[in-house]
Amino acid sequence: MAGLIGAVWRIDRAGAELSMTVTPQVVLDNGLPVGRIGAYVGTAPETVTVRYGLLDGVWQGVVRTWEVSMLTVRMMGRMLIGEVSLKNLSGPLTIADYAGRSASLGITPYLLFLALISVSLGVLNLLPLPVLDGGHLMYYLWEGLTGRAVSDVWMERMQRGGVAALMVMMLIAVFNDVTRLLG
């Protein structure tokens, strides 16, 4: 890795602007050269490697998948009631950008990012919108509770509503992506 060039950072400290040149030092992290500046909030983080056996590893995977699923559901709920900005909704451009960034950090961060996206898309697919799998589950539930299928008229109305809801979500996500790209 060629020599790293320092960057000038401007820091606002109690209303006074300070300028300092920060030059990263090349260190090996898991055998890969990484530029680090050695700055931390508080104390340096402690890194601990944890290894699980097969059954414990599968269980930890289930637990982590559940946690990410619940986080996704909570964030969508907070977006609906206005506690969280719709600007947090990301589309394919932001996902591709973050995938590239995580891939540049190594295989583990990249796989973790892909798992996060996969779980989030799985939760999204289970929303009770008629055009998604969750909507089909709602149809089955209705049929199981009432003993009859949803009428064709209502089916068509709900399908149109589901498509409209998905289109609005996609438009917001792509708008947010383009806004982020353009600054």
Image (cartoon, helix red, strand yellow):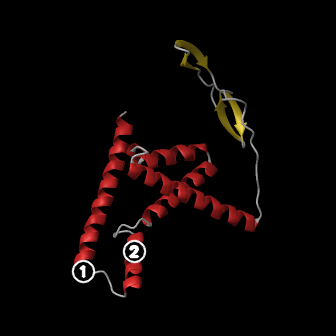
Question: The residue under label 1 is which amino acid type?
Answer: Asp
| Residue at 34% over, 54% down | 169
Question: The residue under label 2 is which amino acid type?
Answer: Met
Quadrant, the N terminus: top right
User: For the image shown, how many numbered marks are present on the structure?
Assistant: 2
Which picture quadrant has residue 105? top right
Whole-percent x, y for residue 148 in the image: 33, 87
In the image, is 86 to the left or to the right of 111?
Answer: left
In the image, is 50 to the left or to the right of 155?
Answer: right
In the image, is 36 to the left or to the right of 175?
Answer: right
Q: Is residue 50 visible?
A: yes
Mark 1 crowdedness (10 Å alpha carbons): few <14, some 14-19, many ≥20: few
List the residue tagged with mark 1.
Answer: 152
Q: Tell me if residue 175 comes above or below residue 17 in the rendering.
A: below
| Residue at 76% over, 46% down | 48
User: Of the residues under marks 1 and 2, which one precedes in the sequence?
Assistant: 2
Whole-percent x, y for residue 39 in the image: 66, 27
Q: Tell me if residue 158 comes above or below residue 87 in the rendering.
A: below
